[in-house]
Image (tube, rainbow, N blue to C red):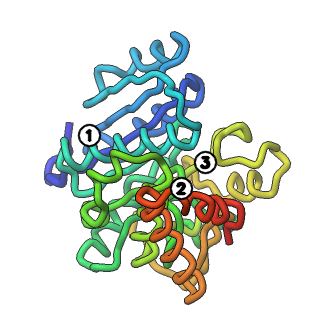
């Protein structure tokens, strides 16, 4: 039930990939997050065995939309991106949300994650450069910094993020739904870099284990312990008046601050990705960019 006074339409989309333990942890963190009752909850689940179905059954009465699908012949990246895109489509086009929080099932969010997103939205929703919020950071956790946030010039949306309706409206959704993951990643990256994302100085999401899709493959990897050491978890701030501090976040190895070189590179990359569907000979150029990510 929505809290009195909160009339904003907003959604949470969880994409699941037949990982029942991770999915259950993710769902539990969402329902434990303060303010979650004010969100439409959508689960887009790729079925495998019956364990994932049983997890969903426990939460079915609390979900607004549930879509089940079976693995296709596409690559893992293609399935992940297709499912996320479809979930975003439901949040924006079916539920008419002002913003949509997108989570992959291998993350958990902190108790104040949704409050953090709402705070950023209230502060920046009128700013035409505001694209959304990314919940991650690798800055070490400190009590002083946990209620502050920085601005990213741009970066890919990551496994736990929010994008606004204005950002969604900038995308050519009909064309995106006809193609694979390449054009979606390129286009959303292209749009995010044209503005900014807000990100916390102490992470509001946690990868649940080194076998998640965003991990290097070892619990001893620097990425794992830096992100884990930054996670707020249930250390809820006494007040939710988040402030902006001049810190440069480093939430993921592939997140980049704005430079003219990056701007040129990703603009060219996005254009080539789009053109490659009309001119197949550009596919080799597209593969070059994949092998040589900056």
Label placed on residue 257? none
Query: Residue at the spot x=55%, y=24% of the render?
Result: 18
Q: Which mark is residue 206?
A: 3
Cβ atoms at labels 1 and 2 below 8 Å apart: no
Q: Which residue is labeled 1 in the image? A: 40
Task: Classify residue 44 as left or right of residue 135.
Answer: left
Q: Nearer the viewer, residue 243 or 99?
A: 99
Judging from the image, what secondary structure is the residue with disc 3 in?
strand
Cα distance in 3D space between marks 3 and 1: 22 Å
Could you tell me how far apart the alpha carbons at marks 3 and 2 are, in whole angstroms? 12 Å
Instruction: Give whichever of 115, 165 is nearer the camera.
Output: 165
The 10 Å Cα crowd at callout 2, few under 14, some 14 to 19, many 20 or more, is some
Instruction: Name the residue rendered at 38%, 60% in the picture.
Output: 117
Residues 152 and 140: in front is 152
Sequence order check, earlier mark of 3 and 1: 1
Q: Position of residue 42 (x, y in %)?
A: 33, 35
Question: Do labels 3 and 1 touch, CB within 8 Å?
Answer: no
> Which residue is found at the position 52% from the left and 36% from the top?
105
Helix, strand or loop at mark 2? loop
What is the CA distance from the residue labelled 1 to the residue labelled 2?
21 Å
| Residue annotated with mark 2 | 158
Residue 138 position (above or below residue 263): above
Q: Quadrant of the C terminus?
A: bottom right
């Amino acid at each position: 039930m929505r809290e009195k006074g909160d009339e904003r339409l907003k959604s949470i989309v969880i994409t699941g990939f037949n990982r029942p333990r991770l999915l259950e942890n993710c769902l539990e963190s969402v329902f434990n997050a303060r303010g979650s009752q004010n969100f439409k909850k959508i689960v887009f689940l790729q079925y495998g065995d019956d364990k994932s179905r049983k997890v969903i059954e426990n939460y079915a009465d609390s979900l607004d939309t549930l879509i089940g699908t079976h693995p296709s012949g596409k690559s893992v990246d293609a399935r992940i991106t297709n499912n996320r895109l479809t979930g975003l489509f439901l949040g924006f086009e079916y539920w008419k949300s002002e913003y949509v929080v997108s989570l992959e099932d291998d993350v958990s969010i902190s108790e104040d994650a949704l409050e953090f997103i709402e705070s950023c939205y209230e502060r920046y929703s009128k700013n035409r450069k505001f694209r959304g919020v990314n919940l991650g950071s690798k800055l070490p956790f400190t009590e002083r910094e946990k209620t502050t946030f920085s601005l990213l010039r741009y970066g890919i949306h990551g496994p736990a993020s929010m994008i606004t309706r204005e950002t969604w409206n900038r995308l050519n959704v009909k064309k995106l739904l006809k193609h694979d993951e390449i054009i979606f990643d390129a286009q959303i990256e292209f749009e995010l870099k044209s503005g900014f994302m807000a990100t916390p100085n102490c992470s509001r999401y946690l990868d649940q284990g080194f076998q998640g899709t965003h991990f290097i493959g070892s619990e001893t990897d620097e990425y794992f312990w830096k992100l884990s050491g930054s996670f707020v978890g249930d250390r809820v701030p006494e007040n939710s008046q988040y402030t902006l501090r001049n810190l440069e976040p480093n939430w993921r190895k592939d997140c980049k601050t704005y430079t003219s070189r990056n701007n040129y590179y990703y603009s060219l990359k996005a254009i080539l990705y789009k053109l490659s569907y009309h001119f197949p000979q550009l596919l080799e150029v597209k593969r070059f960019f994949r092998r040589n990510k900056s």
